[in-house]
């Protein structure tokens, strides 16, 4: 028979988990339930007199081309910035893992970008990539009007992707490096003695072995790009030009806080929540099957 | 020596405690404001002046980092009963506060505390903007401005021009001459709707929306896509296409003000509140001036709109706090205080008495100030009518954002201008209907 550590006294168990549950309740379930309530009513900015409107808020959202635009923009952003940040993080980690000259300095400094608050990252990138005055303005000097994120939606998207990937690559780097260093040296050495080159070892040995980490980072990066990219967008592009970078989370902010339409924002955040949960489910259901943990 | 120091420390400590004791007797209250940068500093200083001017009340002023943030934060604070007694709310937020049920109307405060406030002394353009449809003042106009044309005299001289354009046709011709004379950028603009849409419509006596721009009811509908504003925007687009003008935003790297002050763009439209800023940024020997916004030839010009913010008193505070707030608002309205504020910023005085006093003191003849009187001329050009009194549309901040997005699409060539304006109107109407529904059963005061 299986032996399990159980509490005979349920009251003690309840008392022990109560503080944690209380925190989760106060900071997650309670606000979330408020959002659900608002999503089905109309909530005036100063509160009071909610009116039940059923699914009207959702109908209005789904009938709105601008909303669908923000969904598409979010998906494009999530795909591009996740691919870029994982690729950059992996590349840097492999290099540092190979102990190239100066690797200890890199190991120490590559993590820093993640410690910078998103609005600060945004401000820095806005200055560097400003078409008139930034460092990149030299590009426009040689090729006039090639780069202008203020007027060109594609440039603007590229800019927020780069900014977000730059920040997230640092985070990915640390995880990849830890995973790479957990691989026994002997495996690598044996492969090298068998004549496998660097790229071959990365592809056939290291990558398969760090697949669980890669999967974890995939989930985290996609989730982050959906729910945590607000700071960069707000500072760098403000959702423009002409809504080219209006991510779902930014639209929620601008409808809710700038537009003071709390109900519409609540309905949109429910949709976003369902979407992120759904995406994560898909990843665990279909992608994780191909990951071997041992 | 050491004893002396000890004694000094003791006296300081004693006087500090005494000061603290004295301060504790003062009635404390809070004011939140939205102005930032230099203008925010001046507002904070205004509070300090109030604290120094008397010993009964003590105000703590907290900057919120932007007009919209001041409004958002006040709403959030009100919902958790942590709101300030007084708050500075920008023009576009007026309607939200009128419908909020969370304010203590200014005219009531004046009555309850016997304040010496003569509403008729306020410029009617300023007063009417903030008044209810019945003409009652629910807030105290504070920082006020209007839009002007700023022009670079040196660049104009290069093109053989000596005068600011009075009509839009003159302006068009001037931009052509500037371009021919080698001035690379005749006009810099961003997507702010305040100048091209709101001010333009007022001075041309054109409505933005039905129901007297919303003053007569929450069921107003947008109409600006069918007025001369549409032609005006098409003209702007043609200027951009012909290389007369440039889009300058913070994202491009230079705002319109920076593009004007570094001499690269010859004209801009912006608030008179920036008069001091421009004066501070230009190099010595840079000749520039301001003029009233140009109108289409043959237009009977009307008054331009006031922009800025007013002071609201929030409900749910004690009588002592209201008494303190009343004293503060009375203080702000003093002609001498207005004079100080006007001098330190670029804003205009809000009462006729203060303006006359400033004029009599020779304020508008001073170098660096000269030109600001044009804004008074623009604001008082005519007695405000139902259309030129202002704009009272629900959720106007979001409407501005929608129009801005559509203008971006049109000016960057993604959409035809008329199609963009039609879309902007349709989306604005959606916002208005949404607002009407959210405030169902409440009448606009």
Image (cartoon, coloured by chain):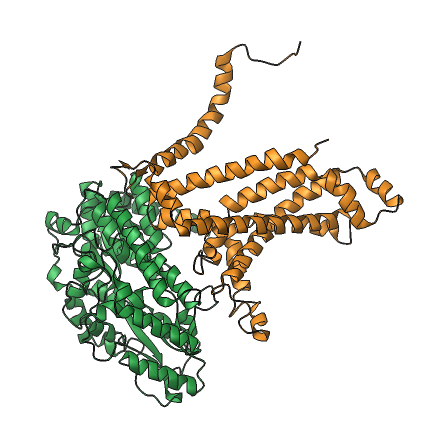
Direction bottom: furthest residue: B160
Can the viewer see residue B187? no
Q: Residue at x 18, y 73 (%)?
A: B381
Can you say whether A95 is above or below A55 in the image?
below
Numbered disc total:
0
- Residue A168 at what x, y percent from top left? 59, 48
Can the viewer see residue B52? yes
- Residue B255 at what x, y percent from top left? 42, 68
- Residue A265 at what x, y percent from top left? 38, 44
Q: Residue at x 36, y 42 (%)?
A: A59
Taking B167 as reference, is A28 left or right? right
Chain B: drawing colour: green
Q: Nearer the viewer, residue B213 or A92?
A: B213
- Residue A236 at what x, y percent from top left? 49, 58
Q: Nearer the viewer, residue A141 or B71?
A: A141
Taking B33 as reference, is A23 left or right? right
Chain A: drawing colour: orange
Can you say whether A236 is above or below B265 in the image?
above
Q: Nearer the viewer, residue B392 or B285?
A: B392
The quadrant in which residue B336 appears is: bottom left
């Amino acid at each position: 028979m299986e032996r399990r550590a159980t509490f005979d006294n349920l009251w003690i168990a309840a008392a022990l988990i109560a503080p944690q549950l209380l925190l989760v309740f106060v900071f997650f379930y309670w606000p979330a339930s408020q959002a659900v309530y608002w999503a089905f009513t109309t909530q005036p900015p100063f509160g009071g007199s909610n009116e039940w409107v059923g699914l009207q808020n959702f109908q209005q959202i789904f009938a709105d081309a601008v909303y669908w635009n923000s969904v598409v923009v979010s998906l494009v952003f999530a795909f591009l910035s996740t691919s870029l940040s994982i690729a950059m993080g992996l590349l840097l980690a492999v290099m540092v893992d190979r102990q190239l000259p100066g690797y200890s300095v890199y190991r120490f400094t590559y993590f820093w970008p993640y410690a910078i608050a998103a609005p600060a990252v945004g401000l820095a990138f806005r200055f560097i990539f400003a078409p008139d005055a930034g460092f990149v303005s030299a590009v426009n000097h040689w090729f006039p009007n090639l780069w202008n994120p203020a007027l060109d939606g594609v440039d603007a998207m590229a800019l927020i992707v780069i900014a977000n990937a730059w920040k997230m690559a640092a985070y990915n780097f640390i995880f990849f490096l830890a995973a790479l260093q957990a691989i026994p040296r002997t495996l690598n050495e044996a492969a090298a003695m068998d004549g496998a080159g660097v790229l071959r070892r990365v592809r056939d040995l290291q990558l398969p072995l760090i697949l669980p980490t890669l999967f974890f980072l995939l989930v985290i990066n996609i989730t982050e790009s959906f729910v945590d990219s607000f700071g960069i967008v707000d500072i760098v592009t403000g959702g423009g030009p002409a809504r080219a970078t209006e991510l779902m989370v930014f639209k929620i902010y601008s409808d809710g806080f700038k537009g003071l339409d709390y109900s519409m924002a609540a309905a949109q955040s429910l949709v976003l929540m369902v979407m992120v949960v759904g995406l994560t489910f898909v990843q665990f259901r279909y992608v994780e099957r191909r990951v071997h943990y041992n | 020596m050491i004893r002396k120091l000890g004694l000094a420390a003791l006296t300081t400590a004693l006087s500090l405690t005494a000061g603290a004791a004295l301060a504790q007797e003062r009635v404390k209250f809070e004011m939140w404001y939205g102005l930032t940068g230099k203008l925010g500093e001046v507002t904070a200083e205004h509070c300090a002046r109030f604290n120094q001017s008397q010993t009964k009340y003590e105000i703590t002023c907290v900057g919120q980092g932007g007009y919209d943030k001041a409004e958002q934060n006040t709403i959030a604070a009100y919902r958790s009963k942590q709101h300030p007694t007084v708050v500075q709310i920008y023009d576009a937020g007026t309607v939200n506060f009128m419908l909020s049920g969370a304010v203590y109307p200014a005219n009531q405060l004046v009555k309850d505390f016997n304040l010496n406030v003569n509403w008729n002394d306020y410029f009617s353009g300023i007063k009417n903007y903030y008044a209810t449809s019945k003409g009652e003042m629910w807030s105290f106009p504070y920082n006020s401005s209007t839009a002007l044309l700023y022009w670079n005299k040196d660049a104009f001289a290069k093109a053989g021009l000596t005068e600011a354009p009075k009509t839009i046709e003159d302006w068009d011709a001037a931009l052509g001459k500037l371009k021919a004379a080698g001035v690379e950028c005749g006009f810099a603009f961003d997507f702010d709707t305040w100048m091209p849409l709101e001010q333009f419509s007022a001075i041309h006596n054109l409505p933005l929306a039905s129901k007297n721009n919303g003053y007569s009811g929450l069921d107003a509908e947008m109409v600006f896509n069918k007025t001369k504003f549409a032609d005006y925007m098409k003209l702007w687009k043609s200027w951009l296409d012909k290389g007369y003008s440039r889009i300058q935003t913070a994202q491009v790297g230079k705002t319109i003000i920076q593009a004007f002050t570094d001499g690269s763009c010859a004209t801009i439209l912006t608030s008179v509140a920036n008069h001091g800023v421009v004066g501070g940024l230009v190099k010595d020997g840079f000749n520039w001036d301001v003029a009233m916004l140009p109108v289409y030839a043959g237009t009977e010009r009307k008054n331009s709109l006031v922009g800025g913010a007013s002071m609201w008193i929030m409900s749910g505070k004690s009588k002592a706090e209201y008494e303190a707030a009343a004293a503060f608002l009375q203080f702000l309205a003093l002609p001498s205080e207005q004079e100080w504020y006007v001098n330190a910023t670029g804003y205009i005085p809000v009462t006729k008495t203060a303006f006359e006093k400033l004029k009599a003191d020779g304020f508008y003849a001073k170098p660096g100030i000269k030109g600001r009187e044009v804004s008074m001329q623009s604001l008082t050009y005519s007695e405000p009518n139902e259309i030129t009194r202002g704009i009272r549309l629900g959720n106007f901040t979001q409407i501005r954002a929608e129009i801005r997005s559509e203008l971006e699409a049109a000016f960057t060539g993604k959409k035809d201008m008329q199609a963009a304006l039609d879309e902007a109107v349709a989306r604005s109407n959606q916002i208005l209907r949404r607002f009407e529904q959210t405030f169902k059963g409440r009448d606009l005061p």
